[in-house]
Image (cartoon, rainbow, N blue to C red):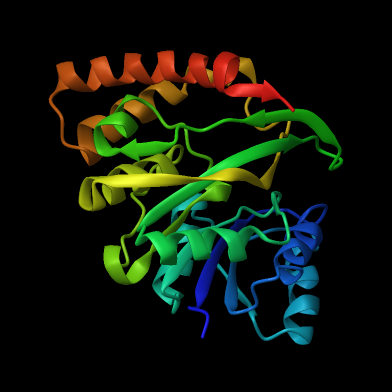
Amino acid sequence: MEPLVSIVTPIYNGSNTIKYTIESVLNQTYTNFEMIIVDDVSDDDTVKIIKEYQDKDSRIKLIALTRKGGASVARNKAIRKAKGKYIAFLDGDDLWKKDKLEKQIKFMEDNNVYFSYTDYSYIDENGNDMGIYRKCPKKMTYLRMLIGDSVGCLTVIYNREAVGKIEIPELKKRNDYALWCIILKKVKKGYKYNEILSLYRKNTNSLSSGKKHKLLKYHYQLHREINGFNPIISVLLTIANIINYICNRYVRDRKI
């Protein structure tokens, strides 16, 4: 029997995209999953749309927060509720190709992999293919991850039974990166399934260039408070993260 996969989906005001995200999960060739969607106090029709799908398919589960908490709180709520052997991540505006779970879970089961990820391509706000994809490293270690995150959240699956229910540090930004560091410190290595299986929706308003510098404090906070490094090492790792970001954008993002 196929192992159960718990899909973690945080969402806020996603009425324009959540339908497509849910359908990309329901269309999976792999059928033994639960999709745990956590709504972060949306004030549009997001919850209404989710409930319509929930009424039709019991694999769709909704948790509606009563107080806004951000992505880390939403993801932690879903992780606590998860029953699957595997935990996968898919935000409420991104998409999966129909064979994503089938191929990636088989890869993990056949090769005893505890943390896996894939390459992913970009779509614009309207769901149009942008002709660009992110080529991720073939393997990932804890030390390599400290230098910078080159793994897409929408592609990650980890073995909950082997790793445990690790909660995400409550950072406003880069909380997924913090989780990857914690997991890789425990399992030592993660591996890529070498195929594009996910579609990342690039929102031009999600992070303006004027706000990008503010991410530096979250990188420093991650390395200083979560990873436990001294101030000097934390600053050096933050600088390494900047270099890695540039490398991701100008080297790893490639035309299809």
Residue 27's place in the image compared with 20, above or below, is below
Residue 127's place in the image compared with 43, above or below, is above
The answer, for residue 172, to whether it is visible in the render is: yes
Residue 31's place in the image compared with 195, above or below, is below
Locate residue 18 relative to residue 66 in the image: left or right: right
Quadrant, the C terminus: top right
Locate residue 222 relative to residue 138 in the image: left or right: left
Instruction: Residue at 30% x, 25% y: name it.
Output: 220
Instruction: Residue at 30% x, 51% y: name it.
Output: 183
Locate residue 100 relative to residue 191 in the image: left or right: right
Q: Position of residue 211 (x, y in %)?
A: 56, 20
Instruction: Residue at 50% x, 16% y: name it.
Output: 247
Q: Position of residue 67 (x, y in %)?
A: 52, 62
The answer, for residue 76, to whether it is visible in the render is: no
Residue 122's place in the image compared with 100, above or below, is above
Q: Quadrant of residue 142?
A: top left
Locate residue 61 relative to residue 204 in the image: left or right: left
Instruction: Residue at 25% x, 16% y: name it.
Output: 235
Q: Quadrant of residue 23?
A: bottom right
Q: Which is more toward the observer, 72 or 201?
A: 201
Q: Residue furthest front?
A: 110
Q: Position of residue 83 (x, y in %)?
A: 44, 79
